Amino acid sequence: MEHIKSILKKLRSESNKSQSEIAEMMGISQSAYSRLENDPGNATFAQISRLAEIYDADIALLLEFDDDQLEYYDYYIEIKKIVEQ
């Protein structure tokens, strides 16, 4: 989880956004975002996915997928494209 924690902080810093701004974009309170950023082990897939969208980052970067897990991620992306049509 330290990987996700450091990546989230780095992405937020690089985006020049505050925790409050990111929290607002996610529809949660600043304190909820702070908990998510400092202890991402309890984050839902939907939250991590939304953060990847906000930061325009590959979700695999946030989740540290291995090769087997990437297959499921690719499947998720294809389903998401179909649903968004």
Image: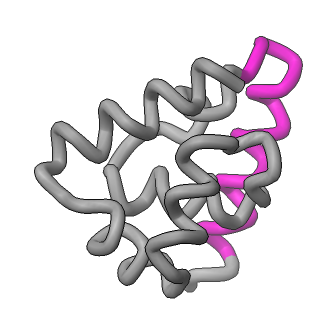
Query: Which residue is situated farthest in the left direction here?
Result: 16
Above/below status of 70 relative to 56: above
Q: How far across and down, in percent of the image, does residue 2 sit? A: 63, 20
Residue 58 placed where, x, y %? Answer: 47, 38
Dominant SS type (magenta): helix
> What colour scheme does the image use?
one colour
Q: What segment carries the magenta color? A: 65-82
In front: 38, or 15? Answer: 38
- Side (left or right) of 81 relative to 22: right
Residue 71 lies in magenta, yes or no? yes
Specify whether 28 is left or right of 25: right
Residue at 70% x, 65% y: name it. Answer: 46
- Image check: 46 left or right of 84? right
- Residue at 47% in and 51% down: 52
Q: Is residue 20 above or below residue 61?
A: below
- Quadrant that contains the C terminus: bottom right
How many labels sit on residues?
0
Residue occupying the point 31% across, 31% down: 10
- Specify whether residue 75 is painted magenta: yes
Quarter location, residue 36: bottom right
Is 83 placed above or below 54 here?
below
In the rendered view of the protein, which quadrant contains the N terminus?
top right
Q: Residue furthest top?
A: 67
Quarter-of-image position of residue 63: top right
Q: Position of residue 17 (x, y in %)?
A: 19, 58
Determine the residue located farthest toward the front in the rendered image: 31
